[in-house]
Image (tube, rainbow, N blue to C red):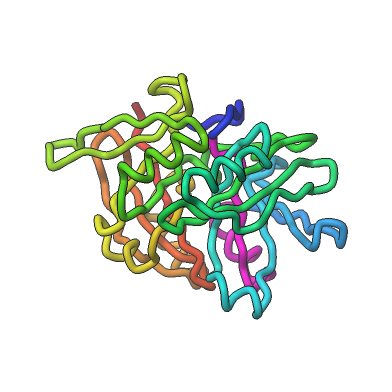
Amino acid sequence: MLTTRFVTGAPNWIDLGTPDLDGAIAFYSGLFGWECAAGGPETGGYGLFMLDGKTAGGVLTVTAEQAEQAEPSWSVYFRSPDAHATAKAVEQAGGSVTFAPRDVLEFGTMAGFKDRAGAFFGVWQPKENPGLGVVGVAGSLCWAELYTPDVPAAAAFYATVFGWETALAPFPGGGGSYTVIRTRGGGEEASFGGLVPLNAVATRAVAGPHWLPYFEVDDCDAAVAEVERLGGKLTLEPMEMAGVGKFANVADPDGAEFSLITSAQL
């Protein structure tokens, strides 16, 4: 279960890279009710998405030059007590550093990496800013999945970097299992995401190895309809799974993909 009591290795930040900041603000405001606190020159224009006065994520403009190297996308960051040590651990485990640890004023330290399969992820080492101010409620991050060509290899990589543990959860009705990821020593309550074979979902395989954030919504079908009304698109039809809930994959008008889920009431 994702909470704001962040421990090492837990998702504690997300941000959106987009070529159209105004368009993104309009889309996510309409979908989730977010407001945007614009960033000043001291943060390079990096803004914050706010939900009821609490931080739901970050947003930055991706320039035309940057867009040639990276598509508009959501990125997931994990808590690190030492971003420089994490960078070394990533390289020793066979990953690579996309951008080296950098201080963000007095708020914390951020760094970006790719795992062995090429999926981008980041870390946030908190100082004055502990991370997201809201998770697990409608309009906020509630889960994260890694689509990867080799689930055991990915599990080993992130166990080395963050100490993550994994558990197999059988699919309802049989037909295989789902690899759940947890922070170290937290047990089932520390579960925050999953590892999925890249070829399990055709639309995800096209994107290559990547992390996909899930946002909680009150009504998955209604949220999908709102995505389309606001100019986004549906990339995976809504599906319902017993004990999990109803979920769908969507993309914003610039192509940044994410998932919507109405979680089952347990």
Name the image quarter holding residue 165. Answer: top left
Give coordinates of residue 266: x percent, y percent. 34, 26
Query: What residue is shown at x 61% (from left), y 45% (from top)?
Result: 87
Query: What residue is shown at x 39% (from left), y 43% (from top)?
Result: 262
Name the image quarter holding residue 25. Answer: bottom right
Q: In this image, 145 relative to 124: left or right?
A: left
Query: What residue is shown at x 43% (from left), y 57% (from top)?
Result: 210
What number of labels is visible?
A: 0
Observer-nearest of 229 and 21: 21
Where 8 sits versus 193, above or below? above
Observer-nearest of 155 and 127: 155
Give coordinates of residue 161: x percent, y percent. 51, 38
Magenta stretch contains residue 109: no
Magenta stretch contains residue 25: yes
Give coordinates of residue 233: x percent, y percent. 42, 69
Residue at the left extreme, as displayed: 174
Q: Which residues are magenta?
A: 10-33
